[in-house]
Image (spheres, rainbow, N blue to C red):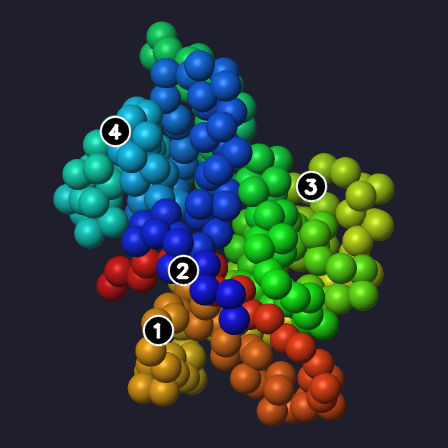
Amino acid sequence: MKRDDLIHPFISGNKLRKLKYNLVEALRNECAGILTYGGAYSNHLLATASAGKELGIPVLGKVRGEELDVQSNAVLSQCHSLGMDLRFLSRSTFTDEKHQSGVIEFEGNSYWVVPEGGANREGIQGCTEIVSELDQSYDYYVVAQGTCTTSLGLLLSIPNSAKLIVVPVLKGFDVLQEMRTLLNDDALFDLHVSKLIIWDQYHHGGYAKSTQDLSSFISEFHTQNSFHIEPVYTGKVFYALREEMLHSPEMFEGKKVLVLHTGGVWVE
């Protein structure tokens, strides 16, 4: 397992990966600040707020849900305490805006916009660096999938002899179409898609949804291991791997398997 959850208390796992080159571009373009998007419990918002605080870059966060405020939950409160300027949008407005990327003018200032979850070209670029940090290659690389940013970075950088196993955490998620759309380079995607394996039956009801089986698995996992997983991403990927190894052990016989722990701070 690659413990990217240990990178930083808030800017952990794939969050730092996806922010790295967005921050570089914000500085290169001499922007007044970062503008980004997230839901009420967004780890991406928290990571961006923390990065902005450490680098002295103002961060404006647009949050899904006009009924919310800075005291609605611990994540939003922490973002506010880190200096993030929080704006609360209706769900329709949020949906219309959340994929914006690059330099925009907002309220008289130039901002570098990071889309929800860091899902842009810069985010993918940061995630391609994960494999280069490993001291050996593996037969299978396994990762939870949300925006597809991390999985695309891995798909483009793992050896051609390896396979990438993705576990989508959203119900009814069209993995191939979503990855193709985000990469926006059909020829490049077609060059690497043969390395992809999709386990799309382990969403447990959809994004941030859970089941009793998943909850029990995570509780048992915590009694046997010294690190934590959560039910949105990492819990589902470890659950999926356990099930597949039980039901199809021949797939993994004699193989080297790497699971990427993508971090995440789960707040009830």
Q: Which residue is mark 3?
A: 183
How many numbered dots are placed on residues in this image? 4
Front tag of 4 and 2: 2
Q: Residue furthest top?
A: 108
Measure the C-alpha gap from mark 4 to mark 1: 32 Å
Query: Would residue 261 be seen by someone viewing this image from the given angle?
Result: yes
Q: Are marks 2 and 1 in contact (CB under 8 Å)?
A: yes
Measure the C-alpha gap from mark 3 to mark 4: 30 Å
> Which image quadrant is residue 34 in?
top left
Residue 23 location, x and y as percent? 45, 30
- Say what amino acid the circle numbered 1 marks: Phe
Q: Is residue 52 above or below residue 4?
A: above
Residue 268 location, x and y as percent? 25, 63
Disc number at residue 5?
2
Q: Residue at x 51, y 65 (%)?
A: 2
In the image shown, does 196 or 133 lie closer to the viewer? 133
Secondary structure beneath label 4: strand
Q: Which residue is mark 4?
A: 85
Neighbours of disc 2 within 10 Å: few (<14), some (14-19), many (20+) = many
Instruction: Decide if residue 10 is on the left or right side of residue 203.
Output: left
Q: Is residue 173 above or below residue 237?
A: above
Front tag of 3 and 1: 1
Disc number at residue 227?
1
Residue 164 location, x and y as percent? 69, 64
Neighbours of disc 1 within 10 Å: few (<14), some (14-19), many (20+) = few
Measure the C-alpha gap from mark 2 to mark 3: 25 Å
